[in-house]
Amino acid sequence: MVRFLVLFLVILLLLFTAELTPYGQQYVVIPWTDTLARISAALVLPFDPDVVSSGKILRSMATGFGISIEAGCNGVEAMIVLIAAVLAYPAPWRSRVIGLVAGFFAIQLLNLVRIISLFYIGQWDKEIFEWAHLYAWQALIMLDALIVFLLWLRSLPSDGPATPDKLSVAT
């Protein structure tokens, strides 16, 4: 357990540091955030022809309301927490890859629901938007990462956690 916690914290620190570097921002965070805005607009467009995206902004041309998907709202931090937890846990690499891919989709699908719901909540009531944005959805996205990790743990082979000797055979 101590090994897991130390490794988790080290990986977490490294990934958060990498995220904050100019390289991480320019080549990962900003392009991903822009992609989230485009995907959100594409999902909303069949129901609302007035929605447009430009960079990290999702805007209604009818109401003028728009949201800017900023750091902390793009699911990157939740993914970093999940990546650190999965990589720190002693499991076969195949299981880790499956957990990370499934976790990516689970977190980002919920994040798309978050972005689109906040887009419409903001057009309806700014006060509720602020509460949903700052409290409800922040907690739910991190809770999603935790639930994905716990479900991944349950999906691991039942012969107990992998030990170093098992890992050398499994890899």
Image (spheres, rainbow, N blue to C red):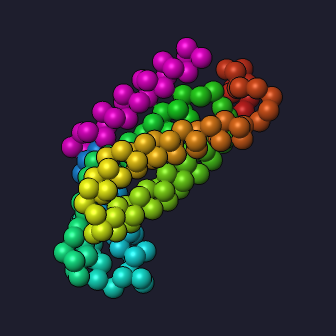
Residue at the extreme top of the image, as rendered: 2
Residue 110 against residue 37 in the figure, above or below? above
Residue at the extreme left of the image, as rendered: 64
Quadrant of the frame with the C terminus: top right
Quadrant of the frame with the N terminus: top right
- Which sits in the foreground, 164 or 103? 103
In this figure, what is the number of numbered marks?
A: 0
Q: Residue at x 55, y 48 (%)?
A: 103
- Which sits in the foreground, 113 or 130? 130
- Which sits in the foreground, 25 or 42? 42
Q: Position of residue 128 (x, y in %)?
A: 31, 56
Residue 7 against residue 111 in the figure, above or below? above
Q: Position of residue 54 (x, y in %)?
A: 23, 70
Relative to 2, 10 lies left or right: left
Q: Magenta stretch containing residue 47, yes or no?
A: no
- Which sits in the foreground, 123 or 4? 123
Q: Main secondary structure of the magenta part?
A: helix
Relative to 86, 77 lies left or right: left
Q: Magenta stretch containing residue 20, yes or no?
A: yes
Q: Quadrant of residue 118?
A: bottom left
The range drawn in magenta is 1-23
Relative to 139, 122 lies left or right: left
Viewer can see residue 20: yes
Q: Residue at x 45, y 47 (%)?
A: 141
Q: Position of residue 6 (x, y in %)?
A: 48, 18
Q: Position of residue 99 (x, y in %)?
A: 60, 44
Q: Residue at x 67, y 20 (%)?
A: 164
Q: Residue at x 70, y 26 (%)?
A: 162
Q: Quadrant of residue 55?
A: bottom left
Viewer can see residue 35: no
